[in-house]
Amino acid sequence: MRFAGKSVLVTGAGSGIGRACALAFAREGARVVCGDRDGADATVALIEAAGGSAVACSMDAGADADVARAVALAVDRFGGIDVVHANAGISGGLAGLFEQSAEDWAEILRVNLIGPFLAIRHAAPVMAAAGGGAIVCTASVAGLRSGAGGAAYSASKAGVINLVQTAAQQLSGSGVRVNAVCPGLIETGMTAMVYDHARQSGKEARIGRLNPLRRGGEAEEIARVVLFLASGEASYVNGQAWAVDGGLSSSHPFTRQDYGRTAV
Ligand SMILES: NC(=O)c1ccc[n+]([C@@H]2O[C@H](COP(=O)([O-])OP(=O)(O)OC[C@H]3O[C@@H](n4cnc5c(N)ncnc54)[C@H](O)[C@@H]3O)[C@@H](O)[C@H]2O)c1
């Protein structure tokens, strides 16, 4: 019960990683504002069915007024805001550099990068006034280097990684920590097409084979790291981007020395 009595806002809580995080926060005693443009009610119903406390907020995570309203809802309903998980995101597909328009880029950057900026902008002052808090943004391994998403998506996630570094610095002395989690391949709504295609073509075993754990990840495996970063256990972790990717980002794509060939 690391979050007993805490007020938590999760954006993108209607599906995938955000839903898993909202459920996990609630299981550990948090009262959760579940923000999403779609599906937040269903997440709230799951939390309430498990005996937890939550409220849905229909919102666009990239719209200034909506983010301000979500933070105000947490304050009004739950007496403050201790944690924000700025998680809502869109992928825009795997389109290459010359297949996306400026409008495509603007929308992906608006949701994926300006969204977390707005979450920090509106929540951090409230947290600071109360003595501190924790903000965790969902970036991606796609933000660490190229090759794990479309061009605009990768740039947006690289921006999130820099944003948490800058925010941690500019919140110096406030008691507010800001970190990012960088998931690898996780089965969610965003990656459903990849998983569906692999299953339909009998190639399911190939999913995640590029990382040394040789599998895709579960949303709950991201949630465990997000909760750690948001908790007091991570009290000295600030301005960091943690990859949770089975080891995918730990190497350049050289031939791997597989265990068994060399060690045994
Ligand atoms: N699934 C992966 O492999 C993976 C890997 C790395 C990073 N991520 C990131 O994880 C985060 C969560 O994605 P997911 O994989 O759970 O996908 P998902 O599609 O299952 O969930 C994303 C949620 O965000 C919501 N959303 C999208 N745009 C929104 C907006 N403008 N306002 C409010 N809500 C909005 C969607 O309605 C959806 O409920 C995203 O930021 C994504 O980029 C996912």
Image (cartoon, rainbow, N blue to C red):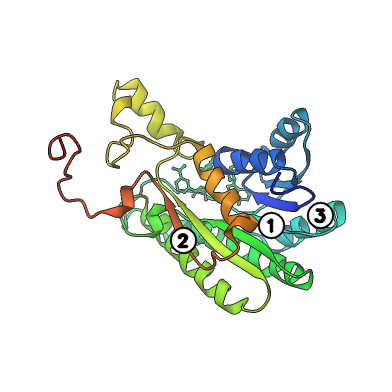
The residue that appears at 74% across and 62% down in the rendered structure is 68
Task: Mark yes or no: residue 114 visible.
Answer: no
Residue 174 location (% of width, % of height): 68, 75
| Marks 3 and 1 in Cβ contact (< 8 Å) | no
- Disc marking residue 241: 2
The residue that appears at 75% across and 55% down in the rendered structure is 70
Closer to the camera: disc 3 or disc 1? 1
Q: What amino acid is found at the position of numbered circle 3 in the picture?
A: Leu
Mark 3, residue position: 73
For marks 3 and 2, the one nearer the N-term is 3
Would you say 195 lies left or right of 172 here?
left
Residue 229 location (% of width, % of height): 57, 55
Mark 1, residue position: 83
Secondary structure type for disc 1: strand
The residue that appears at 52% across and 68% down in the rendered structure is 239
Q: What amino acid is found at the position of numbered circle 2 in the picture?
A: Ala
Closer to the camera: disc 3 or disc 2? 2
Residue 164 location (% of width, % of height): 53, 67
Secondary structure type for disc 2: strand
